Amino acid sequence: MELQKIYQSVVDGSAGEVQAGVQAALAEGVAADVILNQALIAAMEEVGKRFEEGDFFVPEMLIAARAMQSGLGLLKPHLIDSGVKAAGKVAMGTVKGDLHDIGKNLVAMMLEGAGFEVQDLGSDVDSQKFVQAAQDGANIIGMSALLTTTMSYMQTTIQALQTAGLRDTVKVVIGGAPVTDAYAKQVGADAFAPDASSAVRIIKQLVA
Ligand code: B1M
């Protein structure tokens, strides 16, 4: 069945086969949200599980996430037409002064794979951009930092959200190699995510 083929192609990281499978499934009349939930999202859950168990590493996860995104691109217009609601709106960015974006991109892709609407703010993101995203309706702010010199900017952003009166309307989740659970508590974030698949699990719990 097409759904099983799409699922396997995402896990295998084969973007061409994912796209062919999605096109075939749509042509057969399979609903876009069924393809999304039973093939793309289910496969990314499997990828996240394999990563957590140590069977997959960052490259496999990145390749699978890209394959999933190539299928998602084909599905998006159909999902918009059928009015499928996102699980939540996440604004993701790497904090000001920091140009490392590979981990942030991976988290964003995994969240998209899990059904979240993701606004990618890029890297070197000023606190006011996060504030603006919250004002524009993001209910989760995700921040990434890879440098010990830039991670303190996470607190600057949280304070900016507080000053703008938005701290209670958003959940703030942070991550990146130098960030820890203790640091998240210290700066007043709602949670720390050590990797992309835990970010998905933690954010799902926060919005549940
Ligand atoms: Co730079 N760099 N780098 N770098 N770089 C590190 C981070 C470093 C540890 C290397 C080292 O010295 N051993 C070091 C930091 C030292 C420190 O601060 N203690 C360092 C340095 C010093 C620098 C420069 C200052 C070097 C220089 O110019 N002298 C400079 C800084 C530039 C700047 O940002 N202003 C610099 C530049 C660069 C490149 C541009 C060359 C390049 C980045 C390219 C890019 O991202 N587009 C680069 C790279 C590639 C690295 C390393 C090698 C790899 C980082 C990476 O992509 N990891 C890195 C060394 C290392 O980590 N081994 C290093 C893979 C990625 C998937 O993991 O980002 O941790 P990670 O993301 C994970 C989790 O952390 C988590 O999920 C992700 C997926 O599992 N996560 C989140 C991340 N963000 C999250 C957000 C969330 C949730 C989870 O929110 C919800």
Image: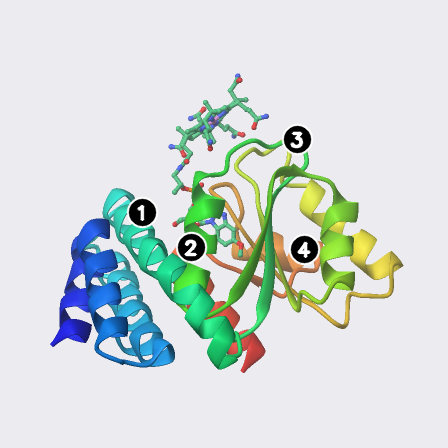
Judged by depth in the image, the label closer to the viewer, 3 or 2, is 2
In terms of sequence position, does the residue under pointer 4 or pointer 1 come before the other?
1
Name the outermost residue toward the front.
Answer: 27
Residues at marks 4 and 1 touching, judged by CB atoms closer than 8 Å: no
Give the residue at mark 3. 97
Q: Residue 45 at x, y = what percent? A: 30, 69
Cα distance in 3D space between marks 4 and 1: 31 Å
Residues at marks 4 and 2 touching, judged by CB atoms closer than 8 Å: no
Amino acid type of the residue that numbered disc 2 sits on in the rendered structure: Met
Label 1 packing within 10 angstroms: few (<14), some (14-19), many (20+): many
Amino acid type of the residue that numbered disc 1 sits on in the rendered structure: Leu
Q: Is any part of residue 106 visible from this angle?
A: yes
Helix, strand or loop at disc 4?
helix
**Residue 163 occupies quadrant:** bottom right
Give the residue at mark 2. 109
- Residue 135 lies left or right of residue 184; in this view the side is right
Helix, strand or loop at disc 2?
helix
Specify the label residue 62 is tagged with: 1
Amino acid type of the residue that numbered disc 3 sits on in the rendered structure: Gly
Amino acid type of the residue that numbered disc 4 sits on in the rendered structure: Gln
In terms of sequence position, does the residue under pointer 3 or pointer 4 come before the other?
3
Judged by depth in the image, the label closer to the viewer, 4 or 1, is 1
Cα distance in 3D space between marks 3 and 4: 21 Å
Q: Nearer the viewer, residue 37 or 130?
A: 37
Q: Is 193 drawn above or below residue 125 in the view shown?
A: below
- Residue 191 lies left or right of residue 127; in this view the side is left
Helix, strand or loop at disc 1?
helix
